[in-house]
Amino acid sequence: MSRRASRRRHVGPLEVGRRRRRIGPFFVTLLVLAIPFAIAAGVYGYVVRDDGAGAGADPLDRARTPEAGGGSLEPRSPAPIRLDGGDAVNVRFSKPPRAALLFDVDNGRVLFRRSPERVLPIASLTKIMTALAVAEETKPDEKVKITRDALKYQGSGVGVLPKGKSVALNAMMSGLLLVSGNDAAIALADHVSGTQKRFVALMNEKARLWGLRCTHYASPHGLEKGNRSCAADLAVLARLAMRNPRITSIVRRKEAEFRFPIKGGKLYLYGHNPLIRAGYPGAIGLKTGFTEDAGRCFVGIARRHGKMLGVVLLNSSNPMKHAETLLDRGFAADRG
């Protein structure tokens, strides 16, 4: 029998009692010290679970929980739209858009809605996501090589992209957002992901991660019917875009000029935004779109009196008139 075993065998009840009495106060002290930390951790956990980002977060910026019965947690929107309240603006159009939303860009509050979750084709409004994905995956000083793939585009385009040459990323982003260049969209997709197919997978993954329930992409430019979304999701993307300085510095402009490796050495771009072209007070963005299936689509942003409002129009008979009316009413309601 070992010496340790012998000692253990001859420990008497009084000694055990003395050991327990010595250990008892130690554990009591630990317990007393641990209680405040446990309470603090519980409060912190509650705040994080409830608000997602602590004090100052958007009221709806929180992770959705699975329904009873299990299932995985759904993605959280980083720029949620608040569809929970009533509308502050009441407008009746003689020929209304198929879907529309007027919202506060800063806090996501909805001021007017018409079928905000109706899934519709979105044409070149697709390029808002394209721009966000490019901005997140690149650095501003990168160069974009013009691939053969980019020169096979259809529809609108920059039109003078020099095959095989490398051009400034900002010029391509401007071609994407100002003139809605499908060739620019393809060139940027190839630059970021190697192929359009892989870039589209990236777009759809971002849509999933951002909690966009209506949204699906089939191309980086939006010509296909498979590019679809809803006004509520597009408002989320608009809020994200207006937080990105690389995007806002482009979409607020009426026109742009770049040094470019083509004859004459300059590229001139003239934007399509009807609010900016018409000189609407405070207009600072964002994107137009059109196909036969989608009709005329528009996401417009304006800032006045310290407020930034956005409007989403899907299949509108007159985007300029509809956007102007909604924004005017929205700014008036906010001041009243």
Image (cartoon, helix red, strand yellow):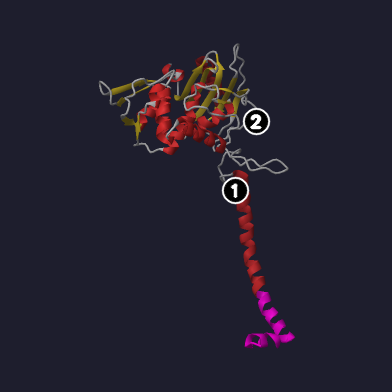
> Dot 1 surroundings within 10 Å: few (below 14), some, or many (20 or more)?
some
* Placement of 205 over or under 97, stated as above or below: below
Q: Is residue 78 left or right of residue 244?
A: right
Q: Is residue 271 left or right of residue 124?
A: left
| Residue 320 in view here | yes
* Residue nearest the viewer, comparing 206 with 279: 206
- Residue 285, by quadrant, is top left
* Placement of 98 over or under 244, stated as above or below: above
- Picture residue at 67% right of the left edge, 75% below the top: 25
Percent across and percent down for residue 17 are 72, 82
Q: Which amino acid does label 1 sit on?
A: Val
**Residue assigned mark 1:** 48
Quadrant for the C terminus in the image: top right
* The residue stretch that appears in magenta: 1-25
- Picture residue at 39% right of the left edge, 25% below the top: 150
Percent across and percent down for residue 190 are 41, 32
- Picture residue at 52% right of the left edge, 36% below the top: 206
- Picture residue at 31% right of the left edge, 23% below the top: 267
Q: Is residue 256 left or right of residue 189?
A: left
Percent across and percent down for residue 3 are 63, 88
Q: Is mark 1 on a helix, strand or loop?
A: helix
